[in-house]
Structure formats: structure tokens, C-alpha cells
Image (tube, coloured by chain):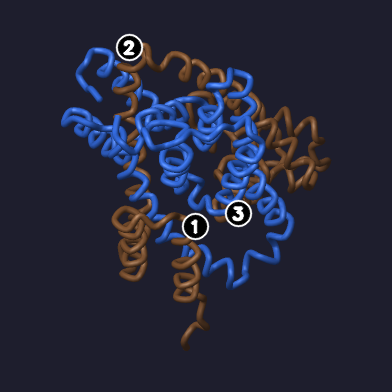
Amino acid sequence: MAEVATTPPTHLQLFVGMQQVALSSFGGGLSAWSERIVVEERQWMSKEEFITGLTVARLFPGPNQINMAVYIGSHFRGLTGAIAALLGILLLPFSLLMLLGLGYYYLHETLAVDRVLSGVITASAGMALSMGFKIAGAYSRDPVALLLAGASFLAMTVFHVRLVPLVLVAGPLAMAWYWPREPKR
Amino acid sequence: MSAASVACQAVQLTDWHQLLAVIWDFLSLSLFSLGGGNTLLNEYHHMAVDQYCWLTSRQFADIYAIAEAAPGPSSMIVGLLGMGAAVKEGPLWGVFSGLMAEIAILLPSTLLMVAAALSWNRLRHSPWRLAFERGLGPITLGILFAVGLKILHISDHDTPAYAVSLVVCVLMLRTKISPLWFMAVAGLMGALGLVNR
């Protein structure tokens, strides 16, 4: 069991630490890098605390890795700590993305760029398609869950229902169904 | 060009009322980003292509790929959408608009996350939490399939393209190969003319 630092990180340390996470994960694996740096290298949190944070980050709306940075920041320094951590994790990737974006919007009509991208999008479409399959296994034994998933899918693709009304109607119904009941003895 | 794209009037973001309307749209979507945010991709497409006419469907597929390939959270695609809305006014407007869009999509979920982090000990055993987690999971699943199908539909236009997508999908699920390799190989196939739009 790793020792956990007694003094919580300062705002500057949160900013620098999250920037280190962002830099290390150029090329992928943000989640693993985040744990390596926060738990092992800097020892801000125990592994258990980190996993609790991941649970919260996944449960609440928002991108998981960004939510995790916000969790770490607010865990130690409240709202301002969250902002420091958020800036740390976003500054470099977002600046780079803005440069790529400018490159794209000014050059996308160039034949070479267009041809490369027409290949790349086939791969990213495959990645998008895999997202659903990745979590489908968890629900394969629950017919109500499959019904809910199927109905949400049909509502969106066939009936063009927008996400907000869909979640506002199906969400409370699903929550009522799954409301924890007293265990039967 | 189809009739729809001619009828579509691009919104002028240099007009402050329009800018505020767009910021409001992103703010109000923020709390609906279930399952890590990918569930919002259909809404982004609807906003950017059908509602505000910032991008064509083809450009949307491009910036989705760029956001996936670039380092950092792929949900930063919102920054590229915002940029696409204003880049015609010049690069500085593009970056400013991209930054505003990104702040708008992250602000509400971040504030909620701070509140959640600070009160987690009270929330963790609440029946609301259990019902939310179990109930919204299947809905997220259905939406993710709808999103996958939509991206597939706007990206692929010939049989070899669909074949590459299906192979990548299977490899994503069965192997731990970095997605960057898939994009590099597919990009090369595009450059060689093996897959086309």
C-alpha cells in the first residue's frame, strides 16, 4: 500500500500534475497515465480513492477523463482546484486541436488532405460503431435493459427523436423500474 | 449539392444574439452527456449540419476523425464545431468561437461534478444513485448504437469503406491495438485511392 501525501497538492501542483497526465498520454491511454501519475508518482491519492473518483467521473455527465481531473482538483482544493486541474489537462491538447482545426478548415479542399481523410474517417467510423458493442455485454442477461436500449435506438434512428426529450422521458421510466427494492427474505 | 443545403442559411456568429443562442444550446446539452459524452454526437451533427449549417455532413465526419486522432479527450470535438461555425470570419474568430463552445459544453457538467465530488459520501448509497446508474445505462447503450450507425452512415460511401469500418470495429473489440494504427493504415488506404468518398 502506497503512502498518501499528508499535505494536499497546491493549485499550481494540480495544474502541473494534470498537464503531465495530458502530455504523457499523447498517443492514448489517458486513464492509465492519470492513475500512474496521481497514485504512484505523486502519491496524492490511494488507489482506492482514485477508483472511487473514477466511479463518480463515469456516473456523472461529462467526458470521463475531464470529470476525473475535476474530481481530483475539487477533492483537494474545491472549485478553484477543479479549475486548475481542468486547465492543466486541457491547455496543451486543446491548443494543439485548435491548430489542427485551423489546418483542416483552410486545407480540407486540397486533394491530398481530402483523400487521406476519406480513409481516416472509415477507421473512426469503425471506432464509433464499436462503442455500443463495448458495453453491450453488461446488459445481455437483462431483457428489460435490452428493451430499453432497443427502444432508445429506434426512437433516435427511425423516429428522429432528439436526445434531450428522449432522456427526459425514458430516463425517469427506467429509473422507476430500477429503483432499488427491499431485498426479499 | 442537395436542395436542403441550399435552403440552409449559415448562422452569423459575429451577430451577438446568434452567438448567445449557440452558447445556450451547448450549455443545455452539457448535462445530457451520458456515458462519457459520445452520446451527444448525434446532437452535434444535428446542430452543426441541419440546424445552423456550419458544416456539411462530410466535414462533420472529418472533424470527428481529427478529434479522435488528436491527443487528449475526444470530446474536444466541440471546439472544432465552434471553430467551424466562425472560421469563415478569420482564424481568430474561429479559435475564439471554438473556445466559447468548449467552455459552454464543459461548464454545467464541471459544476455538477464539483458538487458530486464534495458530497459523494452522502450520495454513494442513495437509492437515486443506484436507480440512475442502472436505469440510464441501457438508454446510453441504445444511444451509442444510434451514434455509431450515424457516424458510419456519414463516413462510408462505398463497399471497401464499409468493409474497413467493420474490420476496425471488430479489431477494437477483440484486440488492444492502439486506434492510431487503424487511422494511420486507413489514411494510407485513402491516399492510395483504395477507399473513396
Tell me where residue B119 sits by quadrant.
bottom right
Looking at the rendered structure, whether the residues under marks 3 and 1 are on a common chain is answered as: yes
10 Å crowding of disc 3: few (<14), some (14-19), many (20+): many
- Tag 2, which secondary structure? helix
Identify the amino acid type marked 3.
Val
Instruction: Kindly identify which chain the residue marked by label 1 belongs to.
Output: A
Disc 2: which residue = A111
> Quick check: A161 left or right of B23?
left
- Tag 3, which secondary structure? helix
Quadrant position of the N terminus of chain A in the picture: top right
Chain A as rendered: colour: brown
Disc 3: which residue = A56
In the displayed structure, would residue A35 be above or below residue B71? below
Chain B as rendered: colour: blue
Tell me where residue B124 sits by quadrant.
bottom right
In the displayed structure, would residue A72 be above or below residue B165? below
Q: Of marks 1 and 2, which one's residue comes earlier in the chain?
A: 2
Query: Looking at this view, is A34 or B185 the one in front?
Result: B185
Identify the amino acid type marked 1.
Val
Residue drawn at 37 percent across, 46 percent down: B147
Q: Nearer the viewer, mark 3 or mark 1?
A: 1
Query: Looking at this view, is B111 or A131 the one in front?
Result: B111
Instruction: Kindly identify which chain the residue marked by label 2 belongs to.
Output: A
C-alpha distance separating marks 2 and 3 = 45 Å
Q: How many labels does the image show?
A: 3
- Tag 1, which secondary structure? helix
